[in-house]
Amino acid sequence: MQTVERWLSMAGTANRAPGHPEANGASPPRPLHPFVAEAGDLVALTLETGQPERFLWIDEKGVADNIGARTGNPREYRKHNLWIPPSVGWSTLDARAQCLVADVLVMLNLIERDGHPDEVEERMIRAEQPGTSSLPPCIRSDRRPLRPDLRAGMADPPAPGTTCPPDCKFQLCPYPPRGCVPRGEIREPFCRQQQALLPGRVRRCLPRGLRRKTPHWVSMRVRELDGFWQQMAGRTRS
């Protein structure tokens, strides 16, 4: 835990200007982004268990696209002399890691959508809101503005921010229409798995210390989150 806490204390410092008060520790650091805090917990579990394939991944889209194969022999994971073998997919990941991968992918697609590089950079800056509101409402509390039902081919697809609530500082919604997602569509099996991880179907099979109703960064009702992933699962169908 001390090792991970030291790493987390440096999170984001590389992007701070030399004169910034937080760059040299002159002022208390900002609260960690919820995704960074969750990743820190998963890193600690990795170090405790010695099983990186359960809690870490190489690339969000790569691991979400690949169901993967489980093996009961830990030596099989190491035969390629790699910390995390290429064959690992989302089925190998712990439930907490699967939830984090899913929402990180949604955020990345909101930020990296089509547009001039300067526009992408501006969206990245808006996504780094400090304090408790470091996640947009469409991820944290209400996913209806994401409008995952939008399809490509619309005469005038909505621009980023057009479906956001009036007081939203992020201006990222709606989600890119089908066919316009920079990292590719999140595949249906992975979306269905997000539904399967919701309460009532998975709590009995999780270790006691890992049981949760929804990810801690989500404050919406379970049925609302289930409805979002239901819509996301249908995007890849013809």
Image: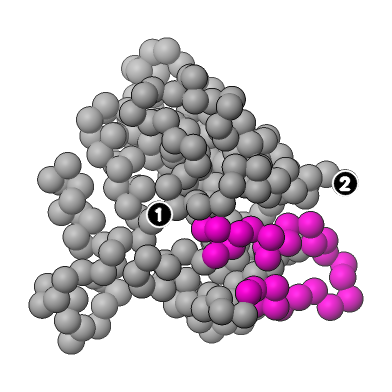
Secondary element type, mark 2? loop
Q: Check disc 1 and report the residue beneath it.
A: 35
Q: Is residue 184 left or right of residue 83?
A: right
- The kind of residue on which mark 2 rests is Ser
* Dominant SS type (magenta): loop
Q: Residue furthest top?
A: 72
With respect to residue 129, does 103 lie above or below?
Answer: above
Q: Residue furthest bottom?
A: 19
Secondary element type, mark 1? helix
Instruction: Identify the residue at horizontal 61%, vertical 59% (top origin).
Output: 142
Residue stretch rendered in magenta on the structure: 137-165
When asked about the image quadrant of residue 16, the answer is: bottom left
Instruction: Identify the residue at horizontal 44%, vertical 35% (top origin).
Output: 212
With respect to residue 61, does 197 lie above or below?
Answer: above
Instruction: Identify the residue at horizontal 41%, vertical 72% (top origin).
Output: 128
Of 230 and 48, which appears nearest the observer? 230
Q: Check disc 2 and report the residue beneath it.
A: 238
The numbered dot on residue 108 is none
Binning the other alpha carbons within 10 Å of mark 2 as few (below 14), some (14 to 19) or many (20 upward) gives: few
Q: State which tag comes first along the sequence, 1 or 2.
A: 1
